[in-house]
Image (cartoon, coloured by chain):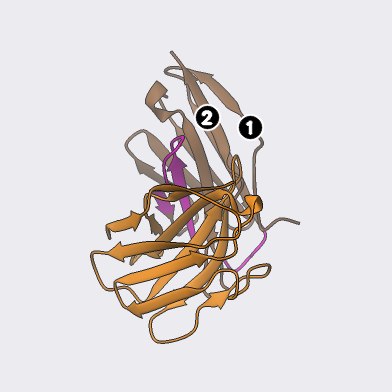
Chain colours: A orange, B brown
Amino acid sequence: SAVISQKPSRDICQRGTSLTIQCQVDSQVTMMFWYRQQPGQSLTLIATANQGSEATYESGFVIDKFPISRPNLTFSTLTVSNMSPEDSSIYLCSVQGEDYGYTFGSGTRLTVV
Amino acid sequence: QKEVEQNSGPLSVPEGAIASLNCTYSDRGSQSFFWYRQYSGKSPELIMSIYSNGDKEDGRFTAQLNKASQYVSLLIRDSQPSDSATYLCAPRNTNAGKSTFGDGTTLTVKP
């Protein structure tokens, strides 16, 4: 299965600022997925990132708040913009394997103060 | 109705017992089903996948699928304290192939 390097692993940010999370995959993948996991809760899909096209956002998530880049088949970034304390969460990138199961990055624990 | 429902936890079993984790799903067209294990403070890890009705065994783990009942389960035999984690069920939806995750069941195995 793919190996994903995600960074930063954690950050504490001031409200109103932005944070960019990076994910590097050790193989080429068509789709990358960005999830959010709030404390004690399950995973919520933010968007699907395809190389060469705009990301597809899920209901409740918008590009202005969570812009995504996908410059090539091994890399993607998610930016959390104009942060508020409600954005405090764990953010995860993931890719699908050949069996359609997901492999996840190690996660970014974001705290907004 | 939620797309994925898991039995409410937390679930606590003694070491050596069988732990049973259950999941129902609403998308009747789902073809692939996955179980993930998530240790506290870590990201989820895929541990089992099942595609056809019946049982699939992998070591101490057995996944069971009943498509007619839209039901998936994970049995952990000879439970160990190291099995203590949250287990997430995720059918692969027919809609763009995405997976929707259940809320998870937290399992504690007591020595």
- Against A65, residue B56 (above or below) is above
Q: Is residue B50 left or right of residue A47?
A: left
- Against B34, residue A99 (above or below) is below
Range of the magenta residues?
B26-49
Please tell me how crowded label 1 is: few (under 14), some (14-19), or many (20+) other residues with Cα within 10 Å: some
Front residue of A24/B96: it is A24
Is residue B42 located in the magenta-colored stretch of the structure? yes
Instruction: Give the labeled residue for mark 2.
Output: B107
Q: Position of residue A8 (x, y in %)?
A: 37, 53
Q: CA distance from mark 1 to mark 2?
A: 7 Å
Front residue of B44/B67: it is B44
Which structural element holds mark 2?
strand
Chain to which the residue tagged by mark 1 belongs: B
Instruction: Give the labeled residue for mark 1.
Output: B9
Label 1 with label 2: CB-CB less than 8 Å: yes
- Against B54, residue A29 (above or below) is below
Amino acid type indicated by mark 1:
Gly
Q: Please tell me in which quadrant of the rendered image residue A84 appears.
A: bottom right
> What residue lies at 42% left-to-right and 76% top-to-bottom?
A69
